């Protein structure tokens, strides 16, 4: 296991900040043209009070910054893996790709929705809010504040429908015939198989045995040889 150094922490923080800045630019690229377009074309948007307009910008900007910052940190973490750690990541990615290729189109859609359900819910809420306000705004007998309240209630109802659909998709994904996921993490065994300090006999024994005690003894012997090689 790699010991995290101060350089690693600074590198991760820098990658997170850079990702957040990219997310801010993306939000600006969405909000500024959208604001100008709505101010020019929509009298209902121009009639909105400033706090509601600001809320719309915040609703777009905050998720863009937070998601981009998180993705930047994750990308930096992945870039720090090498050797057996990188091979383990590649092995897990290969397993996911093989599982994805065996899925039907319906299963792929359900799997994608299950992995991105929070983004779908958030985007669905924003889209339903805009759609509901566009429908409600046609009523000439309501004030702007009444239209906003009614649009929010419509959006809440549609969000509940999205949550129910997400729960159904999660239940469908859990009820398929895929093999159960092991509760114990034995990835260290696969990483140990690629260790250069492992003898051919130990590697063959590690692949053939299912005895956890034997595998631990092999790991201990390899660790001792590593320590001896480091002191030599």
Image (cartoon, helix red, strand yellow):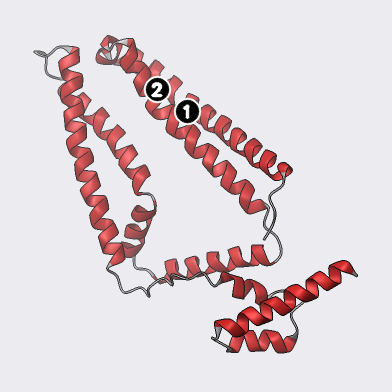
Residue 122 position, x and y percent, is 33, 38
Q: Earlier in the sequence, mark 1 or mark 2?
A: 1
Cα distance in 3D space between marks 1 and 2: 8 Å
Q: Where residue 154 sits: x, y (%)?
A: 17, 31
Question: Is residue 137 at all visible to an observer of this figure?
Answer: no
Question: Which residue is at the front of the view, 214 or 102?
Answer: 214
Disc ID at residue 57: 2
| Mark 2, other Cα within 10 Å: few <14 / some 14–19 / many ≥20 | some
How many labels sit on residues?
A: 2
| Image point (25%, 30%), residue name | 129
Above or below: residue 116 compared with residue 145: below
Residue situated in front as seen by the camera: 216 or 49: 216
Lateral position of residue 173 relative to residue 215, left or right: left
Q: Residue at position x 33%, y 64% from top? A: 107
Q: Quadrant of the C terminus?
A: bottom right
Compared to 18, does 210 lie above or below?
below
Q: Secondary structure at mark 2?
A: helix
Residue with the mark numbered 1 = 27
Counting other residues with Cα less than 10 Å from the Cα at mark 1, is it few (<14), some (14-19), or many (20 or more)?
many
Using the rendered image of the protein, determine whether residue 71 is visible from the camera's viewpoint.
Answer: yes
User: Pointers 1 and 2 in contact (CB under 8 A)?
Assistant: yes
When the figure is inspected, residue 101 is found, relative to residue 19, above or below; the finding is below
**Residue name at image x 65 percent, y 36 percent:** 14
């Amino acid at each position: 296991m790699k010991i995290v150094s101060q350089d690693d922490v600074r590198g991760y923080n820098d990658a997170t900040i850079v990702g957040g800045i990219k997310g801010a630019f993306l939000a600006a690229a969405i909000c500024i043209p959208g604001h100008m377009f709505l101010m020019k074309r929509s009298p209902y948007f121009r009639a909105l009070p400033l706090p509601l307009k600001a809320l719309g910008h915040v609703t777009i900007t905050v998720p863009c910054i937070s998601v981009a910052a998180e993705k930047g940190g994750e990308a930096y973490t992945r870039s720090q893996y090498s050797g057996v750690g990188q091979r383990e990541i590649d092995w897990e990615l290969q397993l996911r790709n093989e599982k994805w290729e065996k899925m039907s189109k319906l299963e792929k859609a359900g799997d994608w929705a299950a992995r991105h359900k929070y983004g779908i819910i958030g985007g669905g809420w924003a889209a339903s809010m805009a759609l509901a306000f566009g429908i409600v705004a046609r009523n000439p007998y309501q004030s702007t504040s009444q239209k906003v309240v009614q649009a929010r209630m419509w959006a809440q109802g549609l969000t509940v429908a999205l949550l129910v659909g997400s729960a159904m998709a999660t239940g469908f994904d859990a009820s398929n015939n895929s093999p159960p996921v092991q509760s114990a993490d034995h990835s260290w065994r696969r990483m140990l198989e690629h260790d250069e300090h492992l003898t051919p006999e130990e590697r063959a024994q590690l692949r053939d045995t299912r005895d956890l005690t034997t595998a631990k003894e092999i790991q201990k012997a390899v660790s001792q040889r590593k320590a001896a090689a480091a002191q030599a």
